[in-house]
Image (cartoon, rainbow, N blue to C red):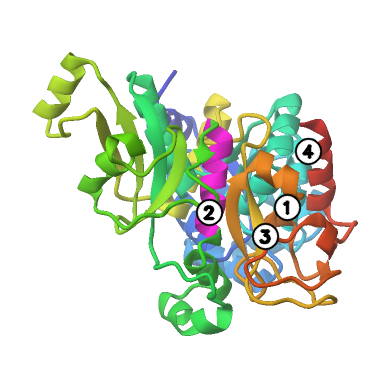
Amino acid sequence: MLNMNTGLRKLDESDKKINVGLVGVGQMGRGIVTQVSKMKGMNIPIIANRTVDRAKEAFQLAGVNCEDIYVTNIVSEAENAIQKGKYVVTEDFEVVTKVLPVDVVIEATGIPEIGAHTALKSIYNGKHIVMLNVETDVTVGPILKRMADSAGVVYTVSAGDEPGAIKELYDFADAVGFKVVAVGKGKNNPLNRDATPDTMRQKAQEKRINPRMLTSFVDATNTMIELTAVSNALGFLPSKRGLIGPQATLKDLPKLFSLKEQGGILDKYEVVDYVLGIAPGVFAIVNSDHPIIKETMAYVSMGEGPNYVLFRPYHLVCIETPLSAARAVLYGESTIAPAGAPVSETVAVAKRDLKAGEHLDGIGGYTVYGVIDTAMNARKERALPIGLVNDKTILKTDVKKGDTINYDMVKLNNDSIVLQLRRMQDKFF
């Protein structure tokens, strides 16, 4: 098997390209378009976005001439334009999933409903699907992965995001024979469960990101979701409901992530967690009791053991995403995907006192935040996955701040694709 760089170079030398269809051109999508324009053997000939002008702008920022951009919502017109070397913009994501020249679709909206619908249509139409939308993955990823396997296409979460970077560290450690006892990520922002788009607006403007996105980072929903994806891929459990989230430096981690009887913080091994003070970056805590391995690890300044930390101090988000698309097409492999039935869930918790009749607003909003728990506990409590919460979710009862919201407390939108997939997943697994 050729390495990926060699594989892409050979495609390029043969005047061939992996054609990528992109859904969503927010900050991440825009970066993907530009990065692919710099890569060998890859091309993005079509973008779907609700705002046509933003999609056109993404192409232009990547160096595409305005006269080479063709706007249509008709599949046959899009195919003809692509065959003539044009770049297509559409308002209809289904067009991206249907056009014949597209080999793989990247979903970059971060919206569970759109992500589920895009993934489902891509799989149905025989396209590999890359989810830069971990929100969808933790809600219905297991059933989408099973569907993709049956269809003979790849379902994968993206490289560059923390879950993909953690899985790459895990794969390295496991391949060389270490026992991996814990994995996790640094959290960039101090934890504030009360954060809202209003309190985050000024910082979001300074960072040039959506206030809801920053809110989901600060209230830790994003961290919980990402580590749920890792848990479901590796079979590792949360260290505890909501995780421990210690403040630490990198050199503290081997001792910190040992068992309590060894002076650490863990009740058990094979867990996921986050750390304040080491962001950006992801880590794997590995273990070896063998004297020769311990001698070698001491020689290369990795510590005295038996626990060691492997640390990757970066994850390049959208810059790395195209590598997942290439890996799917070239090798038929995922970067990270659910291994089977859910192991963990990110469940919705009331951010403030809520009243019956209120509409909830989902990830990064004013009404709920997410907390990781085991899938077993979530089932027992009938806890509502946060990926099913949106502005059409209506409370049927009052809920106190800090209480977990369960299925019996809400009226859901039965027309929702992500809800229908979730019900299918719950029955299947």
- Of circles 3 and 4, the one toward us is 3
As measured in the structure, the alpha-carbon distance from the residue carrying label 1 to the one carrying label 2 is 14 Å
Q: Is mark 3 on a helix, strand or loop?
A: strand
Query: In the picture shown, does residue 301 fall above or below 256?
Result: above
Query: In the picture shown, does residue 403 fall above or below 2?
Result: below
As measured in the structure, the alpha-carbon distance from the residue carrying label 4 to the one carrying label 2 is 24 Å
Q: What residue type is labelled 1?
A: Ala
Dot 1 or dot 4, earlier in sequence = 1
Identify the mark at residue 383; answer none if there is no mark.
1
Residue extent of the magenta highlight: 222-234
Residue at left offset 60%, top offset 47%: 373
Dot 3 or dot 4, earlier in sequence = 3
As measured in the structure, the alpha-carbon distance from the residue carrying label 2 to the one carrying label 3 is 11 Å
Return the residue at label 3.
Answer: 348
Do we see residue 38 in this rendering?
A: no
- Proximity of marks 1 and 3: CB atoms separated by less than 8 Å: yes
Q: What residue type is labelled 4?
A: Gln
Label 4: how many Cα within 10 Å (few below 14, some 14–19, many 20+): some
- Proximity of marks 3 and 4: CB atoms separated by less than 8 Å: no
Q: What residue type is labelled 3?
A: Ala
As measured in the structure, the alpha-carbon distance from the residue carrying label 3 to the one carrying label 4 is 19 Å
Return the residue at label 4.
Answer: 425
Residue 229 drawn in magenta: yes
